[in-house]
């Protein structure tokens, strides 16, 4: 609905930064319903203390680094550290532009600013925030339109600067829905940027979120919310908050919807090779040879980017093994109702060394395991850019890995 609000924020003002850790602290009990209507102003920090300090990870099915000896199996075998989940809940909040949260007492919540302040057009000096450039223009134009969108009651707000990227959506955004289970309120509305791709929105049905529960924030405008639950990061490679972040995708979990709600009847392929055909970034030069080998092991070649949301859910629902060059397409295994295994062919240059460990954590959350074959630069590539280069894998190593991941389960 709409609400009055041409003066919801003054673009010429300086706003103090509010530290979420200084909000009134409340202990959280997993699954116990929290009375969101009785929170103190301007809000509270609900704390769910982790029941364990770390989670042991399953040993990789294979880890072939003969062509890239620098790759360290220890990063994939290390326990996943678990910390307290701190959940800010803000009364009568205002969401501005790219996702900045303004509290009832006119402070910008630090957890909504993060390290992207300058990128947003927000100048932060000594805890004081000033709107500049495009952000200031955005607010001025929104004020000129005279109204701000509003959401009655509580809503879970999920935001990320790269929310339009599939890997970020699956790994960083969707696991935050587990917050609702902790609050004992799995049916609350979800507030998202209106720029989230339609395909991503439809994939929410896998976790039981219907379209009727989705509310949209215009990233070029403002939205007011009675009680905003700011979903925090629950996972980074190597650490998580409160519990294993990918367990909510596992069949039988409280959040996972049944297949009858997410896809048509009919079995999908049990083994899938995720193709990156046509993707010039991190080009695997001998991908065709790898695909031919995978076909001999019963893999079906799939290009996820060409599938609709429904086709994606149908294709990966019954998948037991997902293989492919390392990339976000492998995370489609979260749509499986099995305990999937994964085989990742890892390029020699990645933005972060810990990225392969993410696949270990994803598979572990689903009850499966992952294996890895590391490649090397090819075709004269220098690998000075983490995206723009060509690489290759040892076909003998890939064949050995396929035998390992295809073997009968223990």
Image (cartoon, helix red, strand yellow):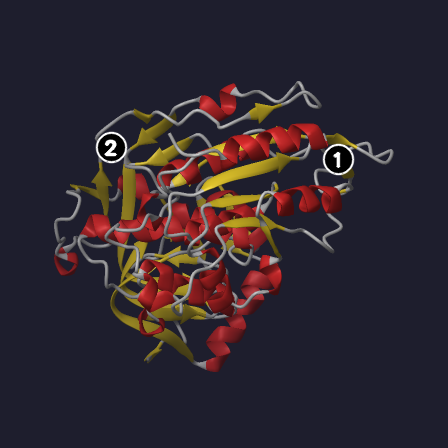
Residue 278 bears which disc, if any? none
- Give how far across and how far down residue 132 sits, in percent: 57, 57
Name which quarter of the figure residue 127 lies in.
Answer: top left
Residue 50 bears which disc, if any? 2
Q: Earlier in the sequence, mark 1 or mark 2?
A: 2
Note whether 268 is above or below 65 in the view shown. Answer: below
At 22% from the left and 48% from the top, the residue drawn is 182
Calculate the distance from the C-alpha at mark 1 to the C-alpha at mark 2: 42 Å
Q: Give the class, few, some or many, for how many residues have Cα within 10 Å of label 1's Cα (few <14, many ≥20).
A: many
Q: Give the class, few, some or many, for how many residues have Cα within 10 Å of label 2's Cα (few <14, many ≥20).
A: some
At 71% from the left and 54% from the top, the residue drawn is 277
Name which quarter of the figure residue 51 lies in.
Answer: top left
Badge 1 marks a residue whose secondary structure is strand
The C terminus - image quarter: top left
Note whether 174 is above or below 223 in the view shown. Answer: above
Horizontal relation, residue 327 to residue 102: left or right: right
Note whether 120 is above or below 363 in the view shown. Answer: below
Q: Which residue is mark 1?
A: 392
Q: How many marks?
A: 2
Which sits in the foreground, 251 or 153? Answer: 251
Which sits in the foreground, 24 or 234? Answer: 234
- Give how far across and how far down residue 81 sits, in percent: 36, 27
Horizontal relation, residue 101 to residue 73: left or right: left
- Give how far across and how far down residue 380 sits, in percent: 87, 33
Name which quarter of the figure residue 136 lies in.
Answer: bottom right
The N terminus - image quarter: bottom left
Task: Decide if residue 113 is in sight here.
Answer: no
């Amino acid at each position: 609905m709409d609400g009055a609000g041409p003066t919801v924020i003054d673009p010429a003002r300086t706003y103090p930064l509010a530290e979420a850790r200084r909000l009134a602290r409340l202990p959280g009990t997993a699954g116990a319903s929290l009375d969101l209507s009785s929170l103190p102003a301007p809000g509270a920090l609900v704390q769910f203390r982790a029941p364990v300090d770390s989670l042991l990870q399953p040993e990789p099915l294979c880890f072939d680094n003969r062509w890239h000896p620098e790759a360290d199996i220890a990063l994939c075998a290390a326990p996943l550290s678990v910390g307290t989940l701190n959940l800010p809940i803000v009364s009568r909040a205002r969401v501005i532009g790219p996702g900045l949260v303004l509290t009832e007492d006119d402070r910008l919540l630090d957890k909504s600013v993060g390290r992207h302040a300058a990128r947003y057009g927000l100048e932060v000096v000594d805890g004081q925030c000033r709107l500049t450039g495009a952000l200031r223009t955005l607010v001025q134009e929104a004020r000129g339109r005279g109204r701000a969108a509003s959401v009655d009651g509580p809503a879970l707000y999920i935001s990320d600067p790269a929310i339009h990227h599939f890997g970020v959506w699956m790994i960083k955004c969707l696991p935050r829905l587990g917050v609702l289970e902790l609050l004992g309120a799995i049916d609350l509305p979800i507030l998202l940027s209106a720029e989230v791709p339609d395909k991503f929105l439809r994939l929410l049905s896998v976790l039981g979120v219907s379209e009727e529960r989705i509310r949209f924030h215009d990233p070029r405008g403002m939205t007011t919310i009675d009680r905003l639950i700011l979903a925090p990061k629950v996972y980074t490679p190597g650490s998580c908050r409160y519990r294993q972040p990918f367990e909510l995708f596992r069949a039988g979990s409280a959040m996972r919807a049944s297949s009858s709600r997410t896809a048509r009847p009919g079995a999908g392929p049990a083994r899938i090779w995720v193709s990156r055909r046509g993707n010039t970034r991190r080009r695997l030069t001998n991908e065709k040879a790898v695909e031919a080998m995978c076909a001999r092991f019963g893999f079906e070649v799939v290009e996820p980017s060409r599938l609709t949301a429904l086709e994606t859910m149908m294709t990966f629902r019954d998948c037991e093994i997902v293989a492919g060059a390392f990339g976000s397409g492998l995370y489609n295994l979260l749509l499986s109702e099995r305990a999937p295994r994964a085989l990742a062919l890892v390029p020699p240059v990645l933005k972060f060394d810990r990225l392969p460990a993410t696949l270990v954590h994803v598979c572990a959350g689903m009850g499966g395991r992952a294996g890895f074959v590391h490649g090397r630069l090819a075709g004269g590539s220098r690998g000075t850019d983490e995206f723009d280069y060509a690489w290759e894998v040892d076909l003998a190593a890939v064949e050995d890995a396929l035998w390992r991941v295809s073997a009968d389960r223990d």
